[in-house]
Image (tube, grey):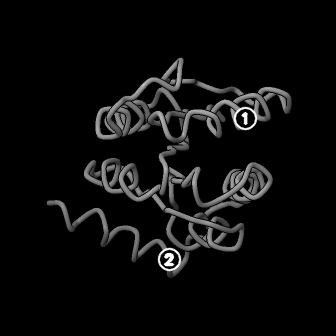
Amino acid sequence: MRIAIASDHAGFQLKEALRTWLAEQSRDVLDLGPATDASIDYPGMGRRLAEAVTHGEAERGVILCGSGIGVSIAVNRFPSIRCALVTEPLSARLAREHNDANVLALGARIVGVDMAKACLEAFLVTPFAGGRHQRRVDQLAQLTS
């Protein structure tokens, strides 16, 4: 599974820590930037990540900003994206299991590195349960039609 990762300047340090951690686990990571912590607007980074997931460049995405709120709003504007903003692993697991979330949003000023890793691990290893949840995910896709 290829994982796209991006952030704004506030999420840069956490993005770098997660990118390194994923690479150490031999995960296929597509780093969409930024390359430094210079100020950058989150909507553009959200677009970059959402397009990468939408166009199949990555199966899952991780997007970060200071709170996680701005980037989650940005990527959820794309019909094929189901982004969940989480602060702990149970929500990350349920986002995958019940909602088939394909993007995880994290707030670098909210969660520390270890909690972010735990959330990301839960997000990556949890399969979508399907069944009754599939009907609801299908209904989400119809909301943009």
Residue 143, located in which quarter of the rendered image? bottom left
1 vs 2, front mark: 1
| Classed neighbour count for the residue bearing mark 1: other residues with Cα under 10 Å, few (<14), some (14–19), many (≥20) | some
What's the residue at 38%, 51% (across, down)? Answer: 81
142 lies above or below 70: below
Question: Would you say 122 lies left or right of 94 here?
Answer: right
Q: Is residue 50 above or below residue 126?
A: above
Q: Is residue 113 above or below residue 37?
A: below
In the image, residue 42 lies at what x, y percent? 35, 39
Labelled pair 1, 2 in contact (Cβ < 8 Å): no
Name the residue beneath numbered marker 2.
133
Q: Quadrant of residue 21?
A: top right
Which residue occupies the foreground of this view, 84 or 2?
84
**Label 1 amino acid?**
Ala
For residue 17, which numbered disc appears in the image?
1
User: Label 1 to label 2, Cα distance in Å?
Assistant: 33 Å
Between discs 1 and 2, the one toward the N terminus: 1
| The quarter of the displayed image where residue 96 is located | bottom right
| Disc 2 secondary structure class | helix
Q: Nearer the viewer, residue 25 or 46?
A: 46
The C terminus appears in which quarter of the rendering?
Answer: bottom left
Q: Which mark is residue 42?
A: none
